[in-house]
Structure formats: C-alpha cells, structure tokens
Amino acid sequence: MNTTTRRRFLQTGAAGAAALAVPIRFARAAKKGGVMRLGSGHGATSDSFDPGTHEHGFTIAMSHGYNGYLTEVASDGSLVGQLAESWEASADVATWTFKLRKGVTYHNGREVSAEDVIASINHHLGEDSKSAAKPIVSPITDMKADGKHTVVFTLEAGNADFPFIVGDYHLPIMPSEGGKPDWQSGIGAGAYRVKSFEPGVRIDLEKYADHWDSGRGHFDAVTMITMADPAARTNAIITGEVHAIDRVDLKTAHLLARRKGLTVHSIAGNQHYTFPMRTQTPPFDDNNVRLALKHAIDRKEMVEKILHGYGVVGNDHPIGRGQRFFAKDLEQRVYDPDKAKYHLKQAGMDSLSVDLYVADAAFAGAVDAGVLFAETAKAAGIDLNIVRTPNDGYWKDIWNKKPFCACYWSGRATADWMFSTAYEAGVPWNGTQWEHERFNLLLKAARAELDEPKRRGMYAEMQQIVRDEGGPIIPMFASYVFATSEKLALPAQMGSNWDKDGERWMERWSFA
C-alpha cells in the first residue's frame, strides 16, 4: 500500500469520527425523550448477552443498543469510527493500528481501554469457541496494546476490509478483568443500558446519560418485544401498543400502508432468502442433485407471490446488486424443469423425493415459499415433502441441522465478510457444509488484493462457483419492509446493511 492509500485509510477513520459528531439529518424534526416500543418478529428463549451467539434481528438491535463497537457502517454504507477514532494499515494491509477515543466509559463508569478490545476479540477465538464470529477474526495472529488507547492487530495475511470486519455485530467491546470479557452482566458502552431482559419475551433499556456521543440515543427508554406472529405485530402497531414493527406481512402491507398515522418502509439491501442443502449429506452430496433443485424453482413467481414485489430474483449466490463486487455479467438462472430432469439423469435418477423443513421464523412467507417450490418442482419429477415446524426453536433445532430447510441472511457489508461467514470451509455458519478448494484459495487471495479489477474478477469467479457448485438455493433478495407510527421521526437516509436502519433504530430514531 503506497503512502497515499495509507493516508486514505487513516482519513477514513478520522472522517468517521467527525461524521458521528454531526447530528443525523431527520426527515421530520426530532426531539429528545419518551419511551419507544418496537414489536420484533425475532427473539428466542435461548437468546443471551453472549455476542458470539447473536444471530437475528432482536439480538442484533439489542447489542447495538447497549454495546459499543470499534467501527460502524453508516446510513450511506460508508465506514465510520465509533469507539475507534482512526485506523491505519501497513503497506501489505496485514497490520492495522486502531486509535481509541479517550474518556469513553461503560455503564459502570469504567473507561474503555485497549486491553478491553483485546479481551473482547479473544472471546471469539480459541479452540473451544463456538462464536459465529470465529471465522472472521481467526486470521488475527496477534493483538497488542500500545498504551491505553491504541491496539495493533496483526493478520496472517492482508485484508483490505478489516476495518469493516471489526464492526460486525458479534464484536462489541466489553469491560474486561484479567483478560476475560464480562458479557454476562449486559454492561456495555452503548447509548442505552439494560434495565431488564427476558429472553424470548422482551428487553427494556434506558438512556445512558454519560454516553460519549450526544448525537445518538434520543429516547429516554426503549422496549423491544418479541412478537413472532405477524398478525400480532400488525395489530400491535394499529392499536398503538408499539411505535414500530419489523417483518411486515407482505400480503397485507398495502392495506397497512393505507392506515392513517402509519408508514410502511421498503429498503432494498443484501437480505436474501435461501434453501440450503447440506452438501455432505445424501442426496445433496451430488452436485447434479443440487443443480436439479436449483433449476426446479421459479424465482420470478417467488418474488411475485412471496415478496409481493418487495424484492428481486436471486442467482444462487449471496452477493446483492448493491454490493461493490456484484457479478452483474453472470448469467441469471431461470426456472427450467427440463434442465432439472437432465441433472437428475446425470445423477442416475429418474425422480427425487426429499424433505424440506420450513417455518415462517426462517423468513416471512417461508411456509408458502416451500409449498410453491414443491409445486414447480413436480414438473421436473421432484417430490418435495414440506415439513412444517414450530417457529419457536427453529434456529436452534432445524437450521444448520436438517439437510434441507429454509433460511434467511441479512447479508454483509462486503463480499469477503459474507463469504467468510457462511461459505468458507469449516466455519460454524456454513449451513451447507460446503468445501471447495478453488473457492477457498480465491477467498484468501482476494482479501489482500489491492488491484481493484483483479479483485473484482476474483469475487466474480467466487460467485459463479457458489452458483454452480455450492449448496444454497437463493431464489430471491428481499427488501426490508417495516412499519412506523407518525409519532416517530426517522432519518432522511436509512441504512440498508441490516433491517430497520441497519438495526441502529434505537440509536438513530426519535419521536417527532
């Protein structure tokens, strides 16, 4: 990395620090105070404060509310500093130096330190770690404190996206003692502090008066309530029980939008709905079987009937159209039962019968999507037995355990982040158990590649490999659709990296 490029990385961090000091622009005038309530379609009795286990909208929003992170993806998709005021890379982008803000405190009054950063990242490392963030931080070979407010990370190889990685929602900076982070207490450095938490039911938070950034955390208190049933969420916002809901029932979204005093928002992002096949379990260990199923699904019909137009067709890889390295020239796969039959014959089969496990906890409309998939697959000689399972416990008992099921991904801010989380060989969230030598070689090489066209070509090839040889069927990318009361003031621009303004709603929104 030349001097100019190194300076650009440093300025990115400094610019982020300055950007967060500027109040967020609101579409309507904002005010301080009040108790905000949100109905969430996520939440499980197995949820906890352990950030390594966070996996859905409830826990992501919860952690963003009470925790502080080194970096943050801003509403416009750029990277800004949070607890880190700046960062700088070595020439080979294998060593990164982060400067922390001084005087930032946790909810117990202790100052955030470099040792806390090291302990917090180490929480996700080690042979016994089951953290979902382990694969994205495992390339770290060394961390050291250079004084109280500077941390130096050394990576096994260069990674130009490393500042994005440390902003992952699994990686909050927690208070530590003796090199061990305290995640159990729920004490963080976020804009809100935890008052009470009942997993699978609700969380209550209150404003932390000594938070370092006066430009976030406008409510006096926030309550987030688990409402798995879409009808219950809809009724809650209509009656005024809550001020906002996520995962709006798309079948009735147009009716909800007509309600006086309510607004339905549709934000295009990287969220995608999938049917992962475990590639080491028969019959999915045969790529021809996987290709047969990929050709047996009607993507356009899915978007029309399941998303009701709130999304676009997918191409069996997880990189969205808005991504920097999206392979726009990759041929779009379409519904073709004849090709599906061909691949079945290549697998030595005249027909196929498999179970597909679904629940609307996987994504809104997953059960209907499974039924629709089964109907289109019949023309290819494929019998899909749709196994409907309870919403409660779906992520614990079905996903990443059953050989063929429904799933959703919110996507990630960078291609490497997405691939490293769910497609790299051996990572915990590789729900397809897929391993591909060429893909894994490209994944490591692309991280350190600073030649933009060359790096783009690597990610394009990786998208094609996943599409043609990977384990997921990805029929559609779904917009984030949520509803809010007119009593709220929302920013003029909202984040699309996660649902509900990047799941930063409790920090960025206010009452009007």
Image (cartoon, rainbow, N blue to C red):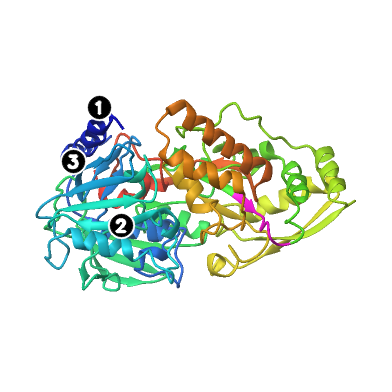
Tell me the tag on residue 142.
2
Residue 217 at x, y percent in the picture: 21, 51
Q: Earlier in the sequence, mark 2 or mark 1?
A: 1
In this view, 183 is above or below 310 = below
Mark 1 lies on residue: 4
The C terminus sits in image quarter: top left
* Residue 164 visible here: yes
**Left or right: 483 with respect to 350?**
left
Amino acid identity at mark 2 = Asp
Indicate which label's residue lies in the foreground, 2 or 3.
Answer: 2
Amino acid identity at mark 1 = Thr
Badge 2 marks a residue whose secondary structure is: strand
Amino acid identity at mark 3 = Ala
Badge 3 marks a residue whose secondary structure is: helix
Q: Within 10 Å of the Cα at label 1, are there few (<14), some (14-19), or many (20+) other Cα atoms?
A: few
The N terminus sits in image quarter: top left
Residue 474 at x, y percent in the picture: 62, 45
Magenta stretch: give its range: 274-281
Tell me the tag on residue 17.
3
